[in-house]
Image (cartoon, grey):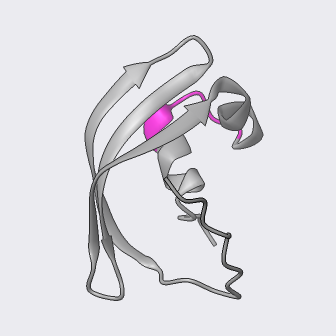
Amino acid sequence: MSELEPLEYETGTAIREYDIIEINQTATGYEVVLNIELDSGYSLAGTKLEVTDEDLQGYETNEIEEGIKFALGFFNH
């Protein structure tokens, strides 16, 4: 396998919506499988997101569904 150089981007595309497929508790938090629709028209299927217990504390919530929203950038204004 060749190693790819990371690319630097100023901004990306916004997430239009997401569906939670599966949530599994791990030793350090949660592993979440999502399907994500991007504003660009593309979608990501079976995407894994790791949310730690420390992340949830930072988001000031104990609920993983709320933590997922925050991790994906959906904040209340």
Towards the viewer: 5 or 71: 5
Main SS class of the magenta portion in the image: loop
* Horizontal side, residue 25 vs residue 23: left or right: right
* Horizontal side, residue 7 vs residue 44: left or right: right
| Residue at x 39%, y 36% (from the top left corner) | 32
* Horizontal side, residue 28 vs residue 60: left or right: left
Residue 30 image position (x, y, % from top left): 49, 26
| Residue at x 60%, y 59% (from the top left corner) | 3
Towards the viewer: 34 or 61: 34
* Horizontal side, residue 41 vs residue 63: left or right: left
| Residue at x 37%, y 22% (from the top left corner) | 24
Quarter holding residue 23: top left
Check the picture and name the quadrant holding the C terminus. bottom right
Count of numbered labels shown in the rendering: 0
User: What residue span does the magenta drawing correspond to?
Assistant: 60-65
Quick check: 20 above or below 40? Answer: above
Within the magenta stretch, is there residue 59?
A: no
| Residue at x 73%, y 29% (from the top left corner) | 54
